[in-house]
Image: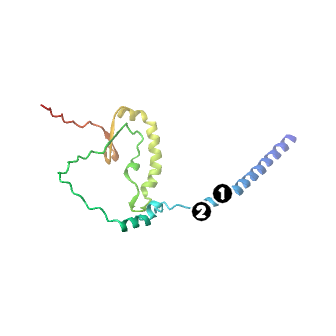
Amino acid sequence: MDFRNHIRTSLADRRRNTCRLLRGVLLCSTPAVMLGCTHIPDQWHETGPAASADWNSPTADDVLAHFASAEQRHRDWPPAPVVVESGAVTHWPLYFEDPFVAKGDGHTGRNKYHEGWEDWFATLYGYSRHTLNWLFFGASVAVTPPWTVMESDGRVSRQILGYDHDATQWHAAPTAAAPDDD
């Protein structure tokens, strides 16, 4: 009989102590949370200094007012030809690449962002895809071995399952032989 009463009183003491602890935590955390609510960022509108700062300063205005801009000079030799490189980046295989990261950025104009259906779908899809990639990692390594050099050009290209990734297998560009100087 005494053992049962001891169990009941110890459970009641635990409940009482737990309630006291929760009240103390709430009492201390509520002001801390309220103090942190002074700034709530708007994720759909850019309000940072890069978007709202004035581009001209009084010093720049004074320099422009007192000094004339330099006249444009023309060279008397022909322009040199410039060849643009592809801009592609080589890397090792990306076994966990997410197509939603490569496809959309949600930016619809200057300082305007939106949240579309892709964001909500990608929340579930990204977790599921990552889990499947871990489960079938061996198959991914068998299809694309780790020593395969891949190339990304920044444009999403058509793959087997649609427009998913921008990484393709790298093929060395043919190089022209240097002319012999005789």
Is residue 57 visible to the viewer in this orientation of the structure? no
Q: x, y percentage for residue 133?
A: 43, 39
Q: Position of residue 159 (x, y in %)?
A: 31, 44
> Relative to 56, does residue 124 appear above or below in the rendering?
above
Indicate the amino acid at tag 2: Thr
Residue drawn at point x = 39 percent, y = 62 percent: 110
Spot the residue most to the front: 66
Residue drawn 47% across the image and 41% down it: 131
- The Cα–Cα distance between marks 2 and 1, rounded to whole angstroms, is 11 Å
Q: Nearer the viewer, residue 163 or 75?
A: 75
Q: Which residue is mark 2?
A: 38
**Toward which corner of the image does residue 37 lie, by quadrant?**
bottom right
Q: Position of residue 9 (x, y in %)?
A: 83, 46
Q: Quadrant of the C terminus?
A: top left
- Is residue 110 depicted above or below 142 in this figure? below
Q: Tell me what residue is drawn at x 55 percent, y 61 percent.
A: 40
Image quarter for residue 149?
A: top left
What kind of colouring is applied to the model shown? rainbow
Is label 1 in a helix, a strand or a loop? helix
Mark toward the start of the polypeptide (2 vs 1): 1
Residue 32 circle label:
1
Query: Given contact means CB atoms under 8 Å apart, are the residues at marks 2 and 1 in contact?
Result: no
The furthest residue to the bottom? 65
**Amino acid type, callout 1:** Ala
In the picture, measured across the screen, residue 82 lies left or right of residue 117, that is left
Drawn side of residue 159 relative to residue 128, left or right: left
Instruction: Tell me if 14 is positioned left or right of 132 in this view.
Output: right
Residue at image coords 45%, 42%: 130
